[in-house]
Amino acid sequence: MTFSSDDEQWREYHVSPRYLAGSTFTGDPALRPLLDSGWLLNDDDLGNVYVNTPDQRVRLAYLPEGDDDALWKITAYSSDYATPRWLVTFQSGTPTEIVAGFTTALAAAYAEGPDFYLHHGNSALTALDAGTPLAAAGWSHSYSYSYSPENVFFQSPDHLAEVYLRHDHLDHTAEMRGHQERWLTLAGPPGNQWYATASSFTPQRLVTAMNTALTDPSPVIRYGYDLQRLPPQATATPVKPRMPTPLDIRRVQAANSRSTVLPTTTAARPATPSPRLLPAPQAPRSGYAR
């Protein structure tokens, strides 16, 4: 896709469904809930970003220069020297708004204490409850035979997003290495899919937050230059320019009056140069930080 002007590149569009919107390629919206809660920010020489709780019990890594295509890796620990209790990952194509739904819930869970970010809701029954937002959004569910007959498979009405819940035995070490997962989300058309995973001991409320963000019907904002990355099944609707406020109108009127009304002259005025009228200040063009 080519653009005829810079204005078109920065034009806002509402994109839906959100799971087809793709990443914004900036981690800020998903990092903000944690930073606002007092989590600590660090980075490395490669440009990777790390956000941890002050006690290091929960750690987020944002890895644009990571070793694989998992852009986001979030882990929680029961003690300083233990292996992670749970692991959540989001692939690089995941819409940032979905990651932000998870980090918002994570910040709230951490504020409530270890029972909520480490241990709350890990039984098979509560794990299935985490699929409630999917069913409420009209997703179909059935038993999947990809791994074993006991596993549950959810699918969006457009067949472009799927969530798998595995009920068979998983090896914890393999899960922490990213080789197995309790929850697997796949979204997008074939050949253009992103994935997200959650391990066995991920608290039910956090998985629920992931699924709620996934099924949120609200469109997300993307810009003109993002449209070339959208799959054809996504809908992009131009956002109408906002209506001018009374203050905007007064500013325009004031600017026009200063630029079109000529100063009057009289013979009695001293022959000194009249001060030059400065143009009205212009509002800076809104930019988009990537």
Image: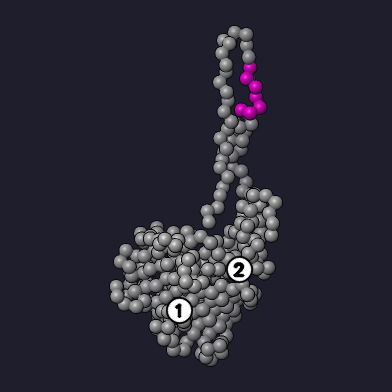
Residue 207 or residue 76, whichever sits in front:
76
Q: Are marks 1 and 2 in contact (CB under 8 Å)?
A: no
Residue 20 image label: 2
Residue 173 or residue 200, whichever sits in front:
173
223 shown above or below 261: below
Picture coordinates of residue 52, whole percent (x, y): 36, 65
Picture coordinates of residue 65, whole percent (x, y): 48, 66
The residue tagged with tag 2: helix, strand or loop?
Answer: helix
Task: Assess whether residue 89 is covered by the magenta stretch.
Answer: no
Q: Earlier in the sequence, mark 1 or mark 2?
A: 2
Relative to 189, is 85 on the left or the right? left
Q: Which residues are magenta?
A: 258-264
The residue tagged with tag 1: helix, strand or loop?
Answer: loop
Quarter holding the N terminus is bottom right
Task: Assess whether residue 261 is covered by the magenta stretch.
Answer: yes
Q: Is residue 182 visible?
A: no
Residue drawn at x 32%, y 75% as measured from the top left? 78
Residue 181 or residue 106, whichever sits in front:
181
47 shown above or below 128: above
Residue 178 image label: 1
Residue drawn at x 36%, y 69% as measured from the top left? 58
241 shown above or below 134: above
Q: Residue flagged by tag 2: what amino acid is it? A: Leu
> Farthest front residue?
45
Picture coordinates of residue 256, whole percent (x, y): 64, 31
Residue drawn at x 62%, y 11% as measured from the top left? 266
Picture coordinates of residue 267, whole percent (x, y): 62, 8
Q: Is residue 93 visible?
A: yes
